[in-house]
Amino acid sequence: MQVWNFAGMVLAGLAFALAGGCPGRQLFLSGEGDGDAAVFVLGMIMEAVKSGNENEVIVMVDTDASKENVSRAAQSKNYSVTDIQQQGDEYRMTLIK
């Protein structure tokens, strides 16, 4: 069992190295306008939606473009955007399955 844990960590490390950094770094880069990092972050959000059994997902975004991208991606996975609240410079989006 520990061999598979080690192999999974090696694979994750390799993937993050090839992607240009850890997920936290990708969040910061997407906030600075890096399109590649934004696609990476959107992929992380959609994978969390796909793998979870949650009926409700809350996503925070900071631009209108991000809000539209998350809305379209959520609708493609059969989620509906039920609530969008502006909180300061950010938008809080509630997605319901």
Image (cartoon, rainbow, N blue to C red):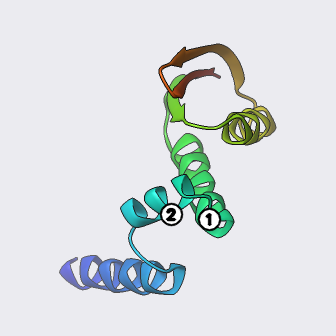
State the image coordinates of residue 48 (x, y, percent, origin top left).
51, 46
- 91 or 48: which is nearer to us? 91
Characterize the local packing of mark 1: few (<14), some (14-19) or many (20 or more) Cα atoms within 10 angstroms.
few
Disc 2 residue type (three-letter): Leu
Q: Which mark is residue 29?
A: 2
Q: Quadrant of residue 55?
A: top right
Disc 1 residue type (three-letter): Asp
Mark 1 to mark 2 CA distance (whole Å):
5 Å
Q: Quadrant of the C terminus?
A: top right
Earlier in the chain: of badge 1 and badge 2, it is 2
Q: Quadrant of the N terminus?
A: bottom left
| Residue named by callout 1 | 34
Secondary element at image label 2 = helix
Give left or right: position of 43 versus 24: right
State the image coordinates of residue 24 (x, y, percent, origin top left).
37, 60
Q: Which mark is residue 43?
A: none
Q: Quadrant of residue 76?
A: top right
State the image coordinates of residue 87 (x, y, percent, origin top left).
48, 18
Is 43 placed above or below 87 here? Answer: below
State the image coordinates of residue 81 (x, y, percent, origin top left).
69, 20
Tags 1 and 2 touching, CB below 8 Å:
yes
- 54 or 42: which is nearer to us? 42
Characterize the local packing of mark 2: few (<14), some (14-19) or many (20 or more) Cα atoms within 10 angstroms.
some
- 32 or 83: which is nearer to us? 32
Is 67 placed above or below 95 here? Answer: below
Q: Residue at x 56, y 36 (%)?
A: 61
Number of on-image labels: 2
Secondary element at image label 1 = loop
